[in-house]
Image (tube, rainbow, N blue to C red):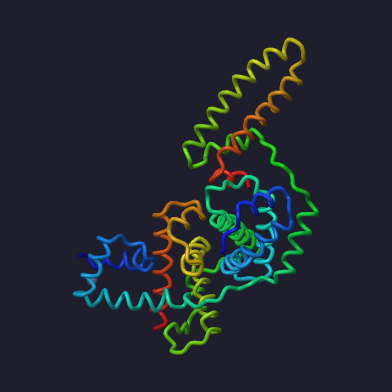
Amino acid sequence: MQEISIQTIKEASEGSMAAFRQIYDKASGFVYNVALRILNNKEDAEEVAQDVFVNIFRSLDKYYFGSSLKTWMYRITVNASLNCVRRRKKEINKHVSYDDALEKNQGLSINAPGAKRIEDEELVTRMLDMLNPDQRACIVLRNIEGLSYEEIAVALAININTVRSRLKRAREILLTCRNEVA
Amino acid sequence: MDCKIIETWILTDYLDGELGPAKLQALESHLKTCRACSDFLQEAKTTIVRPFEDTKQHMPQQEYLWNRIKAKIEEEPKQYPKMTLERIIRSFRAPKPIFALSTCAALILAVFVLTQARALYQKTYNRQLAATALTEQLEYFASDEITSFGTDAENYFL
Ligand SMILES: [Zn+2]
């Protein structure tokens, strides 16, 4: 995300929709992308992205300029996405177990040579599907969004060791699923 | 070097470029002599790093989403957050000690001022009125604190 000037943030916090549109243009891509990766559903991701920006608009005057605006936005986005996951889970009252995920991912072919982008896309979706929402959020922020451990810790309000252990557990699961298939 | 430790480093800090120089050197020299660990590293790279490398960023339908956001903002105009006692108590759970401390200081000050105010009010007004003033004072002191300590604190009020 290119830098958003303090002036723009200030104007948006005072209610300027033109300034807020600039923030939206720069941030809507990653906000939507993170929500979509965590939720794996287009409509839910749109709803979350909408709520996130309304929330950001209303909270900008509480944003402190010393902290990273992007990390702050990641935090709001991940929180909203995880809340949405919990809501959905309650609604359908259905839990996909690790065994179910494993079964669903039979035939997962990570090493297929010359895999096309569409196949990669499908693969990433299935991999994320094997993880619990907390692990998924960590993997999305690290491997897709490229955040550092420290940034992830701030975005998820957890300490760095928790980031590390969630990533480790997530990757062990991904490796195990891969080995089951091989 | 224990292979189990090396595996853990590979799965976390090494793959993520977070390993410090000393550990990095230890890991690299271990890899030169341990076939199992270098195989593990290759597998980890292919299985859990590569698939994510070229994922494209999904974009929302920009104008459609913007219109939804704008509509929602206009439908419910911005409300400036009211500080309730519950929120002030909740803010004590903020991770930054400085924030908890300053809130604490503000509360003590507020209680002091309020005690004074209350004594004064009780002479002239009934208890009902004094209670209203108490809330107002609390709101005043609390909102003053929030603007001066932004950083992470704002997240607790979202
Ligand atoms: Zn080894």
Viewer-side residue, A168 vs B134:
B134
* Residue B49 in the image: above or below residue B2: below
Residue at point 54%, 79% (across, down): A121
Task: Pinpoint residue A173: horizontal percent, then vertical percent.
Answer: 42, 70
Q: Quadrant of residue B65?
A: bottom right
Name the image quarter holding the N terminus of chain B. Answer: bottom left
Of residues B130 and B103, the one nearer the viewer is: B103
Is B17 above or below relative to A150?
A: below
Residue at the spot x=57%, y=69% of the render? Answer: A37
**Res A16 seen here:** yes
State the residue lying farthest toward the top: B123
Q: B20 or B8, which is in the foreground? A: B20
Tally of numbered tags:
0
Residue B80, image x and y in percent? 71, 42
Going by the image, does A46 lie left or right of A105? right
Q: What is the x, y in percent for residue A93?
A: 62, 63
Residue most toward the bottom? Answer: A114
